[in-house]
Image (tube, rainbow, N blue to C red):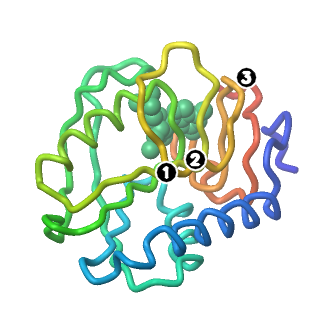
Amino acid sequence: MHNDISEILFTEKQLADRVGEIGAAITRDYADAADEGIILISVLRGAAIFMADLARKIELPLEMDYMAISSYGNGAKSSGVVRILKDLSSQIEGRHVIVAEDILDSGLTLTYLLKNLSSRQPASIEVATLLRKKTLAQAKIDCKYIGFECPDEFIVGYGLDYAERYRNLPYIGILKPEIY
Ligand code: 5GP
Ligand code: MG
Ligand code: MG
């Protein structure tokens, strides 16, 4: 285990198993939707690893696309007001969108994103989040697919960073508070 990690929450094996289950569920749920086209969307950069693994567990034709956004304001808490730095390359009108998220905390970022994407008239839109924090103040978001509930700690690994580090850890763990 990395020296800066106090506890491993989800091992590489647990992550792979759960991502496999979500992929199988999506494969079942969208079996009749493939004609319109499925498009997996992730917000860079945290969700990229989850989406790459998830995509390989969905046994249907699909497209992958990416957005980059930045939150306004400083501070560690998200404000929910975001600016699009890189928009999708594809049109999503009439297609089935699945947004892959790394972690849902306040839910403000995702609320904004879903509103933005819905205005483009997709055939459907659902969220697959790898993690959902047990936070009291959380925006009500319907997540069809949730990997794991996790404690309200600062966690890193499997795509999640602190100051752009730790994304390449194969597991998810709690970062020691003295590091940040
Ligand atoms: P929200 O708008 O839901 O509060 O913020 C969600 C985003 O904040 C996530 O997509 C992620 O980038 C970041 N975030 C929230 N909690 C954590 C955490 O515990 N660890 C890391 N590395 N990022 C987090
Ligand atoms: Mg994210
Ligand atoms: Mg980050």
Q: Secondary structure at mark 1?
A: loop
Q: CA distance from mark 3 to mark 1?
A: 20 Å
Q: Relative to 71, is 15 on the left or the right?
A: right
**Residue named by callout 3:** 177
Q: Residue at x 31, y 68 (%)?
A: 65
Using the image, determine if residue 90 lies above or below residue 146.
below
Q: Give the amino acid type for the residue marked by disc 3 in the picture.
A: Pro
In the rendered image, the quadrant that contains the C terminus is top right
- Residue 165 percent across, percent down from the top left: 59, 48
Q: Secondary structure at mark 3?
A: helix
Contact check, label 3 and label 2, Cβ < 8 Å: no
Which residue of the protein is positioned furthest toward the front in this rendering?
32
Looking at the image, which is closer to me, 117 or 6? 117
Contact check, label 3 and label 1, Cβ < 8 Å: no
Does label 3 or label 2 sit earlier along the sequence?
2
Q: Relative to 48, is 38 on the left or the right?
A: left
Q: Residue at x 29, y 52 (%)?
A: 68
Q: Give the amino acid type for the residue marked by disc 1 in the picture.
A: Gly
Q: Which mark is residue 46?
A: 1
Does label 1 or label 2 sit earlier along the sequence?
1
Looking at the image, which is closer to me, 138 or 31? 31
Q: Give the amino acid type for the residue marked by disc 2 in the picture.
A: Leu
- Residue 64 percent across, percent down from the top left: 35, 73
Q: Is mark 1 within 8 Å of ligand 2?
A: yes
Using the image, determine if residue 11 lies above or below residue 40.
above
Q: CA distance from mark 3 to mark 2?
A: 16 Å
Q: Which mark is residue 160?
A: 2
Residue 76, by quadrant, is top left
- Residue 66 percent across, percent down from the top left: 31, 63
Q: Is mark 2 within 8 Å of ligand 1?
A: yes
